[in-house]
Image (cartoon, rainbow, N blue to C red):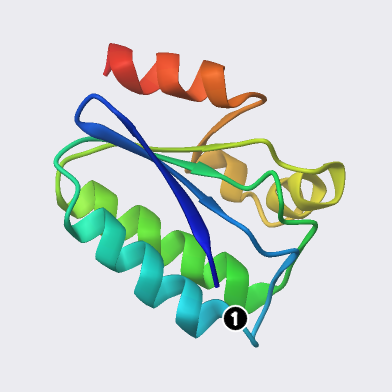
Amino acid sequence: MRTEVVHCGSSLVLCPEVESLDAYVTGEFKSEINALVGSADGHVVLDLGHVSFVDSSGLGAILSVMRLVRGRQKRLVVCLLTPQVRSLFELVRIHKVLDICNTREEAVRLISEA
């Protein structure tokens, strides 16, 4: 799996380039994202613009990233959700525990205010 990494000051924008965040890729997703987050000093934006499908293991992986980031006393913001993924987040109420922005710029602005 390839993940685009953009540095914004001390914060990171991570954009996994996968269409489906499902049981087949969540192990690799978690390893790669956790390694990147583990070396970050600042807040993290998770850009899911390429992801059109998320299953329960994908949701678990995203929550794992959230716990890792919050454990470091930093903020995780998710952005660019497709309508299908946004609907799933709302269905399982994950949008109540994650900051979600419509654009990457909005997400970066939000973490820069933190």
Image quarter hosting the C terminus: top left
User: Which one is in front, 16 or 54?
Assistant: 16
Q: Residue at the location (69% across, 50% down)?
A: 89
Left/right placement of residue 25 relative to residue 36 reads right
Q: Residue at the location (85% across, 42% down)?
A: 83
The residue identified by callout 1 is: 25
Left/right placement of residue 68 relative to residue 59 reads left
User: Which one is in front, 60 or 22?
Assistant: 22
Q: 73 above or below 84?
A: above
Residue type highlighted by circle 1: Val
Q: Residue at the location (56% across, 26% down)?
A: 104
Q: Residue at the location (67% across, 25% down)?
A: 102
Q: Residue furthest right?
A: 84
Locate residue 109: give its quadrant: top left
Residue 67 point in image, percent of width and height:
31, 58
Q: 45 above or below 103?
A: below
User: Which one is in front, 95 or 53?
Assistant: 53
Residue 36 point in image, percent of width and height:
29, 58
